[in-house]
Image: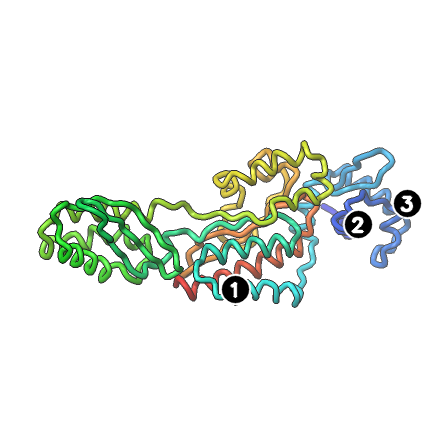
Amino acid sequence: MLTDRQKLILGAVVEDYVFSAEPVGSRTLSKHERIRYSAATIRNEMADLEEMGYLAQPHTSAGRVPSQRGYRFYVDHLMMQTEIDAQTVQRLREVFQQRIDEVERMIQQTAIVVSQLTSYTSIVSGPRVHSERIRHVQILPLAAGRAVAIIVTTAGTVYDRPIQIPEDMSAAELERLVNLLNSKLAGGSLAYMKSTLYREIANEMAGVLEHYEGALGVLDELLKVSEQKKDPVFVGGATNVLAQPEFHDVDKARPLLALLEQADAVYSLLPTESVGIQVRIGAENAEPTLQDCTVIAATYSVNGQPVGRIGVLGPTRMNYARVMQILDYTAGALTRTLQERLG
C-alpha cells in the first residue's frame, strides 16, 4: 500500500518522464510546486518505490523511470481526468461532418486524424460488415448461365460476386427473383440476410419461380457475397513510432513496423472487451513485439451492439490521459454517426 507521499511522487515521475523522455531525479521533483519535500526525502521515497517495483533506475547515476507496474498504478489510481480541449474536439468533428458516402472511407480518415492528434499509431477496425444494412440487391446476367450478384448497403459499400444461374432462366423470371429478394431483404442487415434467406424466401420461391432448384443455388451464392469481405482494419501513422526516443534504434523498431503491415495481426492487437476504455501496458499485451508498448482501445457500436474498435499504439511512456480522452470522444462520435447511417 503506497502512502500519499509516495503516490504524489510516483505520479510526478510518470508525468515528467512522459514529457521529457529523460530519467527523473529527486532534485527535479523537489522544484515542483506541489511536491514540498526536500531532495533527500524524495530520493528516499523513490528508492522505496523502486524496491516495490513501481520505478526503475536505468543507470546507477541516473534518475528513475516508471516501470510497467508504475504505469499501471498511475492509470488505475493517479491519473487526473480532464476535459478534452476544444481544438481537438473541432478537429474530430470535422471528420464526422464531412459528406463521406462510404463508411470505410470515414473510418480510414478517422485513423489518420487520431494518429495526427496523438502523435502515435492508430488502429481502427470495423465496422463489422454484417452490421451494414442492405439498400438493394441486383443480379446482372453476363452470358448463358453466368451473372454477377451485387449487394449495395446503406453505407455505400458494394459487394459483388460472379454466380451461376440456370442457362434457360428467362429475364422475366430473374427479375421476379430479384424483386422477391429486395422485398424481403431491403432495410435488413447482412446478418439478417443470412438468417432470412432460406426461412422466408425459399418457400415463396417455390410458388413463383419455375427454376426452383436453380434459384436455391443463387441464394447460396448470394450468401457468399456477404461473407467474402473481412472486417476492415486501418492503420494511421505507422511510422510515428520512429519519432519516439524508445524506437530510434532501427533494429528495435523494425519488428514493430513489420507487424503493423500485417492486417490479420494488427486486428488482434486491440483489446476485445466491449465496455469502457481498455489499457494494455507492456507485458499485458500477448504479442511479444509489444512488450515495450501500450495499446489503448475503445469500442464503438450500432444499435447497442459493438461493431468495431479504435485504438492507439505507442511506447509505455505515453500521454495516457490525452489518448484516453481522444479515444473516448472518437468512439462516441463514431457510434452516433454510424447509428444515423446504419441504424
Q: Position of residue 1 (x, y in %)?
A: 72, 45
Q: Position of residue 49 (x, y in %)?
A: 77, 42
Label 2 close to label 3 by CB (< 8 Å)? no
Secondary element under disc 3, as helix, strand or loop, is helix
Looking at the image, which residue is at 24% across and 60% down?
182
Q: Position of residue 302 (x, y in %)?
A: 42, 59
Secondary element under disc 1, as helix, strand or loop, is helix
Residue with the most extreme front position: 143
Front residue of this view, candidates 27 and 118: 118
Looking at the image, which residue is at 49% across and 58% down?
106
Amino acid type, residue under disc 2 in the picture: Ile
Q: Name the residue under label 3.
A: 40
Amino acid type, residue under disc 3 in the picture: Ala
Question: Which quadrant of the figure contains the C terminus?
Answer: bottom left
Q: Marks 1 and 2: which is nearer the front? A: 1
* Quadrant assignment, res 294: top right
Report the disc number at residue 9.
2
From the viewer's perspective, tell me whether residue 265 is left or right of residue 49.
left
Tell me, yes or no, if residue 3 can be seen here: no
* Quadrant assignment, res 166: top left
Q: Earlier in the sequence, mark 2 or mark 3?
A: 2
Q: Mark 1 points at which residue?
A: 96
Q: Is residue 178 above or below residue 218?
A: below
Tell me, yes or no, if residue 153 can be seen here: yes
Amino acid type, residue under disc 1 in the picture: Phe
| Cα gap from disc 2 to disc 3, whole angstroms | 13 Å
Q: Which of marks 1 and 2 is nearer the N terminus?
A: 2
| Cα gap from disc 1 to disc 3, whole angstroms | 52 Å
Front residue of this view, candidates 203 and 258: 258
Residue with the most extreme top position: 251
